[in-house]
Image (spheres, rainbow, N blue to C red):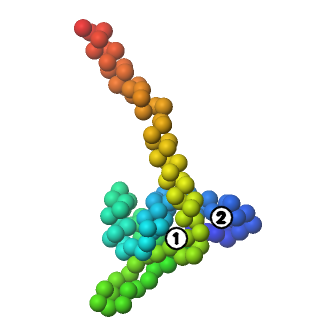
């Protein structure tokens, strides 16, 4: 993420940060509280470890998250939203709610897929 490319347009800065794949999901996971790398990966099983590590680095560089080292006996790193990241929490929750609405009201979900329809028509024609 290169914030300086769009420094004169705050909307483009936000879009450049949020548009990277998995970024919103990572931020949503961290909106529930600090998490270890393995916890984030478990919450988003379809993201590869390399991509997750890259996104976490990008978000840390953008000031959205921070990496903290827990003291012994835990002695591990956890990721958490910064104040800047927490400020985006209402937006994350609104996007998650909107995504659920879209999934529940998808007009295409009620229709069979085109390929399935063609296969059904073909089997009826041969009967």
Mark 2 residue element? helix
The crowding category of the residue bearing disc 1, from other C-alpha atoms within 10 Å (few below 14, some 14 to 19, many at least 20), is some
Instruction: Give the quarter of the image for residue 10.
Output: bottom right
Residue 125 visible in the snapshot: yes
Q: Nearer the viewer, residue 122 or 31?
A: 31
* Res. 13 mark: 2
From this view, report whether residue 70 is shown above or below residue 83: below
Q: Is residue 74 left or right of residue 93?
A: left
Q: Residue at x 45, y 42 (%)?
A: 103
Residue 43: x and y in percent read 35, 62
Q: Nearer the viewer, residue 29 or 20?
A: 29
Residue 18 visible in the snapshot: no
Q: Residue at x 42, y 26 (%)?
A: 111
The crowding category of the residue bearing disc 2, from other C-alpha atoms within 10 Å (few below 14, some 14 to 19, many at least 20), is some
Instruction: Give the quarter of the image for residue 42.
Output: bottom left
Image quadrant holding the C terminus, namely top left
Residue 32: x and y in percent read 43, 68
Distance from the alpha carbon under mark 2 to that under mark 1: 13 Å
Q: Which residue bears the numbered disc 1?
A: 58
Residue 12: x and y in percent read 67, 60
Q: Residue furthest bottom?
A: 72
Residue 24: x and y in percent read 50, 60
């Amino acid at each position: 993420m290169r914030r300086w490319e769009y420094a004169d347009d705050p909307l483009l800065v936000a879009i450049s940060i949020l548009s990277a794949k998995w970024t919103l999901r990572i931020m949503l996971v961290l909106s529930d509280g600090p998490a270890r790398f393995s916890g984030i990966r478990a919450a988003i099983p379809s993201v590869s470890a390399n991509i997750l590590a890259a996104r976490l680095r990008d978000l840390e560089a953008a000031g959205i998250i921070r990496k903290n080292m827990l003291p012994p006996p835990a002695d591990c790193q956890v990721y958490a939203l910064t104040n800047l990241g927490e400020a985006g929490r209402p937006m994350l929750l609104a996007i998650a709610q909107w995504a659920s609405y879209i999934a529940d009201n998808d007009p295409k979900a009620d229709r069979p897929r085109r390929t399935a329809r063609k296969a059904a028509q073909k089997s009826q024609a041969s009967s």
